[in-house]
Image (cartoon, helix red, strand yellow):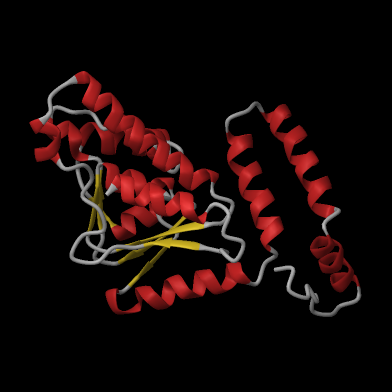
Amino acid sequence: MLSALQSRLDGLKNESTLRVLVIAAKGKAFCAGHDLREMRAQPSHYYYQNLFNQCANFMMSLQNLSVPVIAKIQGIATAAGCQLVAQCDLAVASSDARFAVSGVNLGLFCSTPSVALSRNVSRKAAFEMLATGDFIDAQNALSKGLVNRVAEPGAIDQAVESLVASILKKPAIALAMGKALFYQQLETSMSEAYEQAAHTMACNMMDPSALEGVQAFIEKRPPNWSGSI
């Protein structure tokens, strides 16, 4: 599954018409994480290192994709499945969704999921989930900042489409530049972050879509991006 996802994602890198990526699943669960039977069948450090490197590379590919990535979650999202939710730029959950990084219950601390989780929720909230392995429900995930929106099971498609529609109204170049800067500045000092942000905004401002958007605001009219979106 990881290989298939990576291959599909790699194929989208140069897709000029791609504006938003929605990651969804069929069935009762969004993602239950790694296959534990498969992992237990090959107990070698080499195998485990390659497996978790592969997972980490996929997660970083989501961040490096130039368009917003939305997780659409139903059922459970556990361990690497919860990591996937946290790694996506945005997340919409069904009200029946549940989240956990439960590896610790099996003696395996969810170290790789902790990377994305700790960058979404507060440190104490993240560590409580990691140290207890307990599940949290969708509303709890919303209050902690793990997901953006919660909808009833029958309304989740509409909730995702509403978020997508809002994104599609914005210029692609602004979102691409903004997403890259958003993650880059998180890993730097505040002074470096402001320097990077100023550079990004200056470059963004020179793009025709931004110039038109600002002019439209001044003239109190809708912007005419003429396909630049």
- Which residue appears at 70% of the width and 57% of the height? 173
User: Total of numbered circles in the picture?
Assistant: 0
- Residue at x 56% of width, y 63% of height: 18
Rendered view: 214 above or below 129: below
- Report the front residue among 25 and 182: 25
Between 90 and 11, the one nearer to me in the picture: 11
- Pick the quarter of the image with the C terminus: bottom right
Decide which of 90, 12 is in the foreground and name it: 12
Direction from residue 79 to residue 125 in the image, left or right: right
Q: Could you tell me residue 78's position as x and y percent? A: 23, 47
Horizontal relation, residue 73 to residue 220: left or right: left
Q: Is residue 169 above or below residue 142?
A: below
Residue lying at 40% horizontally and 56% vertically, measured from the top left: 147
Which residue is at the far top? 45
201 with respect to 116 (left or right)? right
The part of the image, by quadrant, that contains residue 160 is bottom left
Image location of residue 228, percent across then percent down: 74, 68
Q: Quadrant of residue 134?
A: top left
Front residue of 156/151: it is 156
**In the figure, 39 relative to 217: above or below?**
above
Image coordinates of residue 170 in percent, x first then y, are: 67, 67
Residue 5 in sight here: yes
Above-or-below relation of 60 to 208: above
Q: Measured from the top left, where is residue 162 in percent x and y?
A: 50, 75
Note whether residue 124 is visible.
Answer: no
* Left or right of 63 on screen, residue 226: right
